[in-house]
Amino acid sequence: MLDNQLESSSLAQPLEPLLDLSSRQAADIFARAGRAQSNLSKLTLDIRLAGLRKLLDYVVENRDDIIDVLCRETRKCRTDALVSEVLGVLDNFEWLLKNARKILREKRVSTPITLLGKRSRIVHEPLGTVLIIAPWNYPLHIGLTSILAAYVAGNAVIFKPSELTPMQGLFEKLFAVDPVMADSIQVVYGTGKSAEQLIEQKPAKVFFTGSARTGRKILHQCAEHLIPVDLELGGKDQAIVFDDVNLERSVKGVIWGALTNAGQSCSSVERVYVQSGIYEQFVALAQQEIEKLVLNSGDAGNADVGGMTADFQLDIVHRQVIDAQAKGARILTGGATLLDNELFYRPTLITGIEDDMALMTQETFGPVVPILPFNTEDEVVDCCNASAFGLSASVWSKNLARANRVARRLECGAVSINNVMLTEGNPALPFGGTKLSGYGRQKGEEGLLGYTRSKSILIDKDSQKLEPNWYPYTRSKYLAFDQLIKTMFSHNPLKLLKMAIIGLKLETIAKRPR
């Protein structure tokens, strides 16, 4: 059993600082993006998808080298890098290749009978130059899925990775597989100051994934220029486990959902509510599972949990654990860094949690599993919805009617039933949250269309016909329109015939001079 001695969690390996952009450099980047956007607008979707196909093949063929870079910069274990980053990216690429044409194509929509003879269309156009600011926890997955959706939709893209995981040179090498892609996507390095300079150039839209604190700053700056923003800002996701579940499977699923990527996922399980009848058994099995886990990064694929990426995040996790312990919580295992390597925070199981603890009110973003008992469905839903966050959740129950009912009552953007974090594994499903977890959606049809603006087109024939609603207005025209409304919204089975007669009358009136 791991001992519970609390150790310091300060990291002493700072990255070399990246130079931030000047205003002139930011302007030059946007000028280049504008030229790329102009060139891109002359090319077809098929050309963009052909480049995406090349990129997919390149990632498959070079996945080991990509994983090496990921593990070095994020300290992930190798399996997390392979499955959560590389496989997730490839799944998303494959979905775009199969679905983008249908989603982005011009659509014919219905036209009301009052506009008889006319046709209506919706065209989805690119926004222009979009700015994507990615986080450090899934730098490849979030970066590439966002960039390529924007590019496939026809936009020039400026991408700023986190300064904590810049992976300098990797993205450029990926985009170089296709000349059009390489011309259309620019990677810009630096801190938040570089992001501020880029926003001042007034991108068509900003897509940001990160903390609520930084999200507020970006939203404030964008508001000055009326720049639309999509924000994915993290969560305090709950797992709800009812007492009719397969206990072993539920424990293993919840523990993975809490500790994958060392808990550094916005949709990690950060609150586990277990129905009272199985609470003690669940806690005991969870402790056994956690104490079996192997911690390592840069491994050969045989480690379970990697290290923390950011020293400040490790300190946040540790402070929350100390706060909980000071207020009466019980640490059953973990609660400290490894004695011989402070880059790793040991997976931590905590019980005796109260609502006023930081573990319940703030995002943890680390390998901590707080488990709380509940009695009734209404009780647990109320507890979950009291959170200021609302990203995703998981509900575990053999009773699928109950699980579905609870899923629909939870105030969040996604729910996995009898699984965990699985909505993110389906590229067809949109991803995003509510409340402090932000707004807007990535992935799926909704996410792809978020990189476009819709243009409505109504087509009429060039003829001698005058529209009845045009000038001049006359008393006879007013009365005919009034009769049309009364007939159109009646329940008379002959109303279509009567409307046709009134329509002919209106056309005749429209030809008369005042």
Image: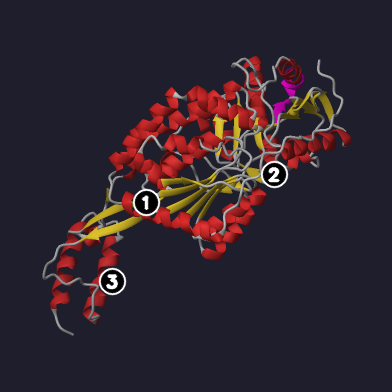
Q: Tell me if residue 277 is in the magenta stretch.
A: yes
- What residue would you read off at disc 1? 36
Label 1 or label 3, whichever lies nearer to me, is: 1
> Judging from the image, what secondary structure is the residue with disc 2 in?
loop
Q: CA distance from mark 1 to mark 3?
A: 53 Å
Dominant secondary structure, magenta: helix
The amino acid type found where label 2 is placed reads Ala
Q: Magenta stretch? A: 272-282
In which quarter of the view is residue 467 placed? bottom left
Of residues 475 and 39, which is closer to you in this image? 39
Quarter assignment of residue 405: top right
Q: Out of 437 and 278, give the one closest to the viewer.
A: 437
Q: Is residue 508 visible?
A: yes
In reply to whether residue 159 is colored magenta, the answer given is no
Question: Residues under labels 2 and 1: Cα distance?
Answer: 47 Å
Residue found 76% across the figure and 39% down from its top: 316
Q: Quadrant of the C terminus?
A: bottom left
Left or right: 147 as drawn, with respect to 463: right
The residue lying furthest to the bottom in this view is: 514
Q: Which circle's residue, 1 or 3, is located before the other in the chain?
A: 1
Query: Circle 2 is placed at which residue position?
Result: 386
Dot 3, how many residues are within 10 Å of its Cα: few (below 14), some (14-19), or many (20+)?
Answer: few
Give the residue number, with chain letter if any, for mark 3.
482
- Looking at marks 3 and 2 on the same chain, the residue that comes earlier in the sequence is marked by 2
Determine whether, in the image, residue 167 is placed left or right of residue 172: right
Type of amino acid under label 1:
Ala
Q: Residue at x 28, y 71 (%)?
A: 482
Q: Are marks 3 and 2 in contact (CB under 8 Å)?
A: no
Q: CA distance from mark 3 to mark 2?
A: 51 Å
Tell me residue 34's x, y (percent): 39, 56
Q: Amino acid at mark 3?
A: Asp
- Disc nearest the viewer among 2 and 1: 1
